[in-house]
Image (tube, rainbow, N blue to C red):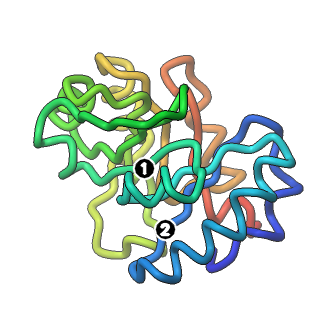
Amino acid sequence: MADPQSLLSHLPRGAAVVLRHKNAKILTALANRIVPNAHQLGLKVLVAGDVRMAINVGADGVHLSEGNTRRGPLRISSRKPGFIITCAAHSHRALWRAKLANVDVAMVSPIYPTKSHLEAQTLGALRALRLMKSSPQITGALGGLSTKTIKRLNHRAVFGLGAIEAWRS
């Protein structure tokens, strides 16, 4: 969503919103606007791909690409206790890298075709659940989730869900 502001009041307390944009200035402006409102509603905010920005705007954490975990253990210094680190994971190897990188939650993705990553090869529910069940890492599901497809992922291996389309439907 270009601007999740209207969605915030519909999310349950404790839910997290990931903010992402290719333009750092736009992402910073969005985060500066969203973070205070989200915090008033008891929501967490993660900034995609930029740890320093996440800390500077008062976000609760960062969401990283799978590639970021290839560098080994992440050394993120934050004065904020409980700083959350999530990452995308597309394979079993990526889940192990996430564990070694000290990521809190690896978002297994994409489960289904998604408009935000049209070219991505999807995992499907069964393969995604197999990955999550065998993961050394806490996992969530991401990618193409809707109110209908989320039901297929009802399993204790799924710690959380990330969705855009589910909120539009």
Identified by mark 1, the residue type is His
Q: Secondary structure at mark 2?
A: loop
Residue bearing the label numbered 2 = 20
| Image position of 68 (left or right of 10) | left
Identified by mark 2, the residue type is Arg
Residue bearing the label numbered 1 = 63
Q: Are marks 1 and 2 in contact (CB under 8 Å)?
A: yes
What residue is rendered at 87% in x and 54% in y? 10
Q: Secondary structure at mark 1?
A: strand
What residue is rendered at 13% in x and 34% in y? 72
Q: What crowding class fits label 2: few (fewer than 14 Cα within 10 Å), some (14-19), or many (20 or more)?
A: many
Residue 124: image location, x then y, percent: 39, 47
- Cα–Cα span, label 1 and label 2: 9 Å
| Image position of 54 (left or right of 59) | left
Of callouts 1 and 2, which one flags the residue occurring earlier in the amino acid sequence? 2
Who is closer to the viewer here, 19 or 160?
A: 19
Q: What crowding class fits label 1: few (fewer than 14 Cα within 10 Å), some (14-19), or many (20 or more)?
A: many
From this view, report whether residue 51 is shown above or below residue 133. below
Residue extending farthest front: 79
The disc placed on residue 75 is: none
Residue 75: image location, x then y, percent: 25, 34
From this view, report whether residue 17 is shown above or below residue 92. below
What residue is rendered at 43% in x and 64% in y? 113
| Image position of 36 (left or right of 30) | right
From this view, report whether residue 76 is shown above or below residue 53. above
From this view, report whether residue 64 is shown above or below residue 152. below
Residue 74: image location, x then y, percent: 24, 35
Quadrant of the image occupied by residue 5: bottom right
Residue 24: image location, x then y, percent: 42, 77
| Image position of 139 (left or right of 164) | left
Who is closer to the viewer here, 126 or 99?
A: 99
Which quadrant: the C terminus?
A: bottom right
